[in-house]
Image (tube, rainbow, N blue to C red):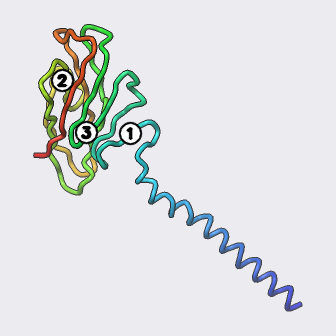
């Protein structure tokens, strides 16, 4: 009879151990999930700061060379706007002021989605983000256009 109780105790102990490991394993792997660079089509270029929305804009091409970024596209109408092509996130615990330092060209990058108020500098509180949009006015006649920019901190 004692052997039966001992086997029952051992089976229950290993069942509890298996249950605890099944519950704890996802938490162990989830903490490493933040290191993945590509999730659901969004491509992270700068750690925690710039996220390109590649899945929403298949006709835009994004590239990076050091701290300079490049967006290339082909115009399909005289005046064209791409709203929210990328997201800038402040991963720090203190506010930051970001600025878009765009090389001269026909297309314009700006924070937000308001075409009437194209701001190129924004202050972000900790753990917040802002969308960046692209506008190519009627005066920009070239069919294929490229915008180069840097994300500056003030």
Crowd band around label 2 with a 10 angstrom C-alpha radius: few (<14), some (14–19), many (20+):
many
Q: Are marks 1 and 3 in contact (CB under 8 Å)?
A: no
Above or below — where is 71 with respect to 98? above
Residue occupying the far left of the picture? 154
> Where is residue 23, by image quadrant?
bottom right
| Residue at mark 1 | 43
Counting from the top left corner in percent of width and height, residue 9 is at 76, 83
Crowd band around label 1 with a 10 angstrom C-alpha radius: few (<14), some (14–19), many (20+):
some
Q: Residue at x 25, y 27 (%)?
A: 133
- 3D distance between C-alphas at marks 1 and 3: 15 Å
Locate the N terminus and report the quarter of the image it occupies. Answer: bottom right
Above or below — where is 7 with respect to 67? below
Residue 65 is marked as 3
| Residue at mark 2 | 108
The secondary structure type at the circle numbered 3 is strand
Looking at the rendered structure, the number of numbered marks drawn on it comes to 3
Residue 98 is marked as none
Crowd band around label 3 with a 10 angstrom C-alpha radius: few (<14), some (14–19), many (20+):
few
- 3D distance between C-alphas at marks 2 and 3: 20 Å
First in sequence, mark 2 or 3: give its number: 3
Between disc 1 and disc 3, the foreground one is: 3
Asked whether, in this view, residue 133 is left or right of residue 13, the answer is left
Q: Residue at x 31, y 16 (%)?
A: 74
First in sequence, mark 1 or 2: give its number: 1
Viewer-nearest residue: 19 or 25: 25
The secondary structure type at the circle numbered 2 is strand
The secondary structure type at the circle numbered 1 is strand
Counting from the top left corner in percent of width and height, residue 100 is at 16, 35
- 3D distance between C-alphas at marks 1 and 2: 22 Å
Above or below — where is 119 with respect to 33? above
> Where is residue 114, by image quadrant?
top left
């Amino acid at each position: 009879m004692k052997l039966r109780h001992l086997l029952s105790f051992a089976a229950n102990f290993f069942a509890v151990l298996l249950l605890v490991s099944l519950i704890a394993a996802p938490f162990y792997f989830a903490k490493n999930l933040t290191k993945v660079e590509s999730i659901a089509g969004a491509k992270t270029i700068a750690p925690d700061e710039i996220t390109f929305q590649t899945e929403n804009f298949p006709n835009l091409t994004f590239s990076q060379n050091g701290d300079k970024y490049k967006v290339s596209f082909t115009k399909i109408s005289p005046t064209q706007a791409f709203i929210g092509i990328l997201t800038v996130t402040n991963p720090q615990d203190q506010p930051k002021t970001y600025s878009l330092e765009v090389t001269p060209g026909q297309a314009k990058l700006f924070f937000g989605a308001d075409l009437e108020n194209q701001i190129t500098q924004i202050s972000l509180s900790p753990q917040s983000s802002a969308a960046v949009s692209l506008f190519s006015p009627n005066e920009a006649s070239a069919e294929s256009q490229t915008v180069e920019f840097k994300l500056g901190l003030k």
